[in-house]
Amino acid sequence: MNLKHKTTEEYQGFEQGPIRPPSEAFSLLVRVTRNCPWNRCTFCPVYKDTRFSIRPKDHVIKDIDSVHRSVEIIQKTAREEANVPLAEIRKAAGNGDHVDPLAFNAALNWARDGMRSVFIQDANSLIIKPSDFVEILTHLKMRFPWVERITSYARSHTIARISDDNLKAIRDAGLNRIHIGLESGSDNVLKMTQKGVSKETHIKAGLKVKKVGMELSEYVMPGLGGKAFSEEHAVETADALNQINPDFIRLRTLAIPNSVSLYDDYETGRFEKCTDLMMAEEVLLFIESLNGITSVLKSDHILNLFQNLEGKLPEDKENMLDIVRRFLAMTPDRQCVYQVGRRLGYFSRLSDMENPRRLERTKKACKQFGITPENVDEVIDELMRRFI
Ligand code: SF4
């Protein structure tokens, strides 16, 4: 794989990549690389059929400067006229300095959201030369000294290969949180899904991030082991996290869109997907197995069955387990209604079933589409694909 960018590449203007973590919804997105250098995980649809490249450092600096110029215009206009509508600010920019419209738009959204955080894109920014990363971060901090949080996605495989000194230099330059797609702590699951990393490397990378004093957010994918490895996936993932003690553990349930290679395995029966009920049992075992750590568990993804499955370990562990146990103790009919209501966006938590209007709408949908406890998982699969 050729990781080098062409030095002759011409600047094409401000760029942003396709995704960011849900928790970075209010962050400015600064694109340092394009796509994913690995791009082989069998469950991942994000960068399929794209080529990885590193953007020239001076192009990233130009992006930052464009946003900075836009922010200055926005702040000036807002100072001159209180409560000025966004459309007016947009017009003022069009009449004045020539700014990159995409950068201006990004700045406008960022200004509206308080300009407190920045997310460095795309899938594995730490693969660039550490000295380039430090330079980009330093420029970012110089332009926007008030920014409190700068974060990035990174692969464990990449972090494990960065020296402590370089990682420390990146932290000192401003990167204070890293999001890692751990997905699983089971070597069987990691191998089966071609994650390109082992449990040992995940643990090594996680501990490294913590050692240099950055915040660490680890993503876990319930359901990734399928029926065959469900239990192992839960126990081994918890064991890896117990050794790392990350600041955040974030759940993002498996879904299998037609575009990923795991879909072929699913279609041919080589991969047997867990039902929602099995997934709930897996999550229960996973949380039960989290011990001796102080992480915050988050469930901030639309694909998850319980949006309120959140809390700080160890004190909120029993509350979180109670949510899953209550679901598992429900009758199949009620479980089915909850599953459908959750996927249709009527429910985000079990207590939403107490809302007569939402419950009625969900029951109506079940009736209309003929959804029963027997076919609910098939229907849900279809619904989940729409959210990916
Ligand atoms: S490393 Fe991340 S972005 Fe790349 S293919 Fe795997 S899951 Fe997708």
Image: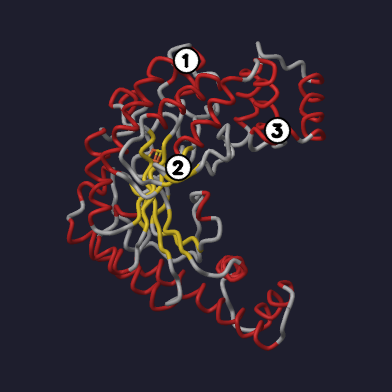
Q: Position of residue 370 (x, y in %)?
A: 77, 15
Which is in the foreground here, disc 1 or disc 3? 3
Q: Is mark 2 within 8 Å of ligand 1?
A: no
Check disc 3 and report the residue beneath it. Answer: 344
Q: Amino acid at mark 3?
A: Leu
Circle 1: element type: loop
Is 68 situated above or below 183? below
Q: Quadrant of the N terminus?
A: top left
Is 180 situated above or below 64? above
Residue at mark 3 to residue at mark 2: CA–CA distance: 22 Å
Q: Position of residue 325 (x, y in %)?
A: 53, 25
**How many numbered marks are there?**
3
Give me the residue at 64% from left, 38% from top.
348
Corner quadrant of residue 231: top left
Circle 2: element type: strand
**Sequence order check, earlier mark of 1 and 3:** 1
1 and 3 marks in contact (CB < 8 Å): no
Q: Quadrant of ligand 1?
A: top left
Nearer-the-camera pick, 91 or 315:
315
Nearer-the-camera pick, 120 or 3:
120
Q: Quadrant of the C terminus?
A: top right
- Side of 141 relative to 130 (left or right): right
Check disc 1 and report the residue beneath it. Answer: 272
**Sequence order check, earlier mark of 2 and 1:** 2
Crowding at mark 1 (Cα within 10 Å: few <14, some 14-19, many 20+): some
Give me the residue at 50% from left, 24% from top.
279
Q: Which mark is residue 250?
A: 2
Q: Is mark 1 within 8 Å of ligand 1?
A: no
Q: Amino acid at mark 1?
A: Glu
Is 174 situated above or below 222? below
